[in-house]
């Protein structure tokens, strides 16, 4: 592997789109509902438990947090959407900033869309996948918290979820656990390959 994920550094926090850094580096966007495990996954990929916490402000962060991975690409940690709320539609459940990120011309190379493997499909996740399919947004689907399943249960659950969700036919789908460090090297390799690193 050519990317040293341990060499991941916090670089910026943006409270609105105009504060998002300009960079020639490719950008990977972490999207998903609040509490799905976005920050934990960044820490797990970098093997650094303190990384995402460094940039956290007390209370709920409504900002995009940027990390530079080995000077080869950026990770943008988007604010989660609608954890406690039952969203009527995507716009309502999605944070304004996260919504702007996808609709106001920000350039990114790949979206990692995280979904908690334990949960039944949410309107927000279905809506986000529909949006990405319709707009040809390149994405990987990453099911999180897979340590909650036994190996056999996980196989069944993945088959079940792949039927329910309308993934693009060639979409990369991963099952990971940040706490048990499962599926991380597969994800890292696929990111590298996708970005041509
Ligand atoms: N069992 C288990 N718990 C996890 C895993 N990843 C994250 N969690 C837990 O899920 C909770 C939320 O994790 P975060 O990484 O803060 O989630 P987030 O998506 O960054 O949440 P927001 O920043 O609010 O959008 C924490 O209590 C984590 O410990 C995992 O792989 N397995
Ligand atoms: Mg977070």
Image: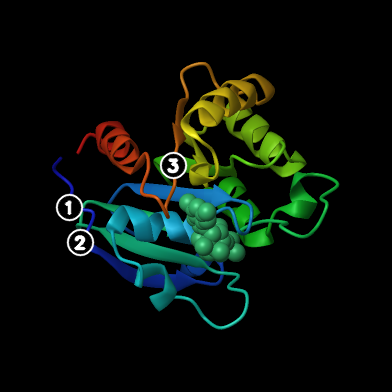
What residue did someone put label 3 on? 176
Task: Give the CA distance from mark 1 to mark 2.
Answer: 6 Å
Q: Earlier in the sequence, mark 3 or mark 1?
A: 1
Position of 98 relative to 158 (above/below)? below
- Near mark 3 (Cα within 10 A), the count class, few <14, some 14-19 or many ≥20, is many
Quadrant the N terminus occupies: top left
Q: Nearer the viewer, residue 167 or 27?
A: 167
What residue did someone put label 1 on? 4
Here the colouring is rainbow
Q: Is residue 178 left or right of residue 68?
A: right
Q: Earlier in the sequence, mark 2 or mark 3?
A: 2
Q: Secondary structure at mark 3?
A: loop
Q: Secondary structure at mark 2?
A: loop
The structure residue drawn at horizontal position 61% and vertical position 80%, both measured from the top left corner, is: 59
Q: Quadrant of residue 160?
A: top right
Position of 8 relative to 162 (above/below)? below
Task: Give the CA distance from mark 2 to mark 3.
Answer: 21 Å
């Amino acid at each position: 592997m050519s990317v040293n994920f341990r060499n991941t550094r916090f670089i910026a926090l943006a409270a609105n789109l105009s504060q998002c850094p300009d960079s020639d580096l490719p950008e990977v966007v972490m999207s998903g509902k609040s509490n799905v495990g976005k920050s934990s996954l960044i820490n797990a990929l970098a093997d650094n438990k303190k990384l995402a916490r460094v940039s956290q402000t007390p209370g709920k962060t409504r900002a995009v947090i940027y990390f530079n991975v080995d000077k080869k690409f950026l990770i943008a940690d988007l604010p989660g959407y609608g954890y406690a709320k039952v969203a009527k539609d995507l716009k309502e459940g999605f944070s304004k900033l996260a919504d702007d990120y996808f609709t106001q011309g920000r350039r990114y190379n790949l979206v990692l869309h995280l979904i908690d493997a334990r949960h039944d499909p949410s309107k927000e996740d279905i809506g986000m996948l529909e949006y990405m399919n319709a707009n040809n947004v390149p994405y990987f689907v990453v099911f999180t918290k897979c340590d909650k399943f036994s190996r056999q249960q996980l196989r069944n659950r993945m088959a079940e979820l792949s039927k329910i969700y309308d993934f693009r036919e060639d979409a990369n789908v991963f099952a990971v656990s940040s706490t048990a460090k499962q599926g991380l090297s597969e994800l890292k390799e696929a990111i590298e390959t996708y970005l041509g690193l």
